[in-house]
Image (spheres, grey):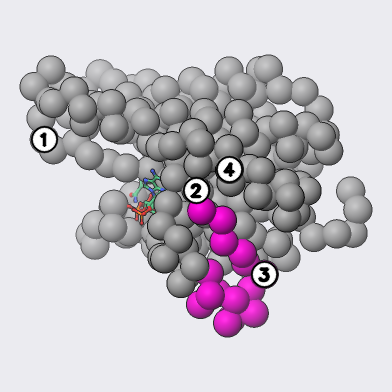
Amino acid sequence: MSDEKQVALVTGGNRGIGYELVKQLASSGFKVILTSRSSETGNKVTGELRELNMDVSFVLMDVDDPKSIEQAAAKVYEQHGRVDVLINNAGVYLDEHKHLLDMDPSVIEKTMKTNFFGPLYVMRSFIPLMEKRGYGRIINISSEYGEMRALSSQGVGAYKLSKFSLNGLTQLIAAEIKGDIKINAADPGWVSTDMGGPSAPRTPEETAKSILWLATIGPEGPNGKFFRDKKQIDW
Ligand code: NAP
C-alpha cells in the first residue's frame, strides 16, 4: 500500500453507531466519507467533525435508492479514486409487535429494502472500486436478530429476516470475491441509539471500538465470518 491515507466510507453516518464509526475511523487516521440520505443533516454533522480537525467529507447517499448509490460511487471515485474500507451501517427497525403474517407487507418490503437490498446495491457499486486496487475491507452491521437461532422464536420478523439475509449475502459475496478484499458481518450488541433506545447497556463508543478492528485486518484475516466483541460467532 502507498503512504496515502486510506479512505473509509460509512453509510448512515449522521447519527447513532454510524456517527461513532466515522469519528473513530477519522481519529485513527482514515480519510472518512460520511454518507447520509439527508444533505442538510449530513453537511451539518460533517461540518461539526471538521471543526474538530477530523478528515471527514460528506457524500449524499440514500441506500433505498440504487441511483443515489451509483451517483455516490461515481462522486467518490472522482474525488478520491479509492475506497479501502466500506461499512454498511444504515438500517431501520420498523417492526411493531406484530406477527409476520399480520404485518402490513410494506413493513417487510421497506425493512428488506434498507437492511438487505441497501448493502447489496452499495457493494455492487463500491466493490469495483476496491477491485481496481485489489484491496478492501467491508463490514456489514448485522444483529443477533440475524442469527439462525433467532428464527426459532416469534417476533421482530421483518428485522430478523433482513439481518439473516444480510448474513447470507455476506457469506456469498465473501466466497465470490477475489484479491485482498475481506467482507465480514458484525453484531454491535444492544446499543443506546435512537434505534436501541435509552435502556440499552452499550454506548456507541464501546460498540464502534468492538467493530473497527475488522477495518484493518491483514491479508490472512477472516473473510465471510460473523463477529461480536472481536469473537467469531455462529451464523
Ligand atoms: P439509528 O440510531 O436509528 O441510526 C440509523 C442510521 O441509518 C441513521 O443514520 C439513518 O439516517 C440511517 N438510515 C436509515 N435508512 C437509511 C437510508 N435509506 N439511507 C441512508 N441512511 C439510512 O440506528 P443505530 O442503532 O445506529 O443502528 C446502526 C446499525 O446497527 C443498523 O444497521 C442497525 O440495524 C444495527 N444494530 C443496532 C442495534 C442497536 O441496539 N442500536 C443492535 C443491533 C444492530 P437518518 O438519520 O436519515 O434516518
N-term-proximal mark, 4 vs 2: 2
Task: Determine the secondary structure under disc 4.
Answer: helix
Q: Nearer the viewer, mark 2 or mark 1?
A: 2
Are the residues at dot 2 and dot 1 in contact (C-beta closer than 8 Å)? no
Residue at 64% across / 23% down in the picture?
A: 174
Amino acid type assigned to the residue bearing label 4 in the image: Gln
- Residue 124 vs 1, above or below: the answer is above
**Magenta stretch in the rendered image:** 46-60
- Residue 50 vs 61, above or below: the answer is below
Place of residue 232 in the rendered image (x, y in percent of width and height, measured from the top left) = 55, 34
Q: Which residue is tagged 2?
A: 61
> Which residue reaches farthest bottom?
51
Q: Nearer the viewer, mark 3 or mark 4?
A: 4
58 falls in the magenta region: yes
- Residue 37 vs 120, above or below: the answer is below
Are the residues at dot 3 and dot 4 in contact (C-beta closer than 8 Å)? no
Badge 3: residue crowd in 10 Å (few <14, some 14–19, many ≥20): many
**Looking at the rendered structure, which numbered label has been put on residue 55?**
3
Are the residues at dot 1 and dot 4 in contact (C-beta closer than 8 Å)? no
Q: Is the CB of the residue bearing disc 4 within 8 angstroms of ligand 1?
A: no
Are the residues at dot 2 and dot 3 in contact (C-beta closer than 8 Å)? no
192 falls in the magenta region: no
Are the residues at dot 3 and dot 1 in contact (C-beta closer than 8 Å)? no
N-term-proximal mark, 1 vs 4: 4
Give how far apart the Cα atoms at labels 3 and 1 are: 41 Å
Q: Which residue is tagged 1?
A: 97
**Looking at the rendered structure, which numbered label has been put on residue 71?**
4
| Residue 19 shows up from this direction | yes
Give how far apart the Cα atoms at labels 3 and 4 are: 22 Å
Task: Determine the secondary structure under disc 1.
Answer: loop
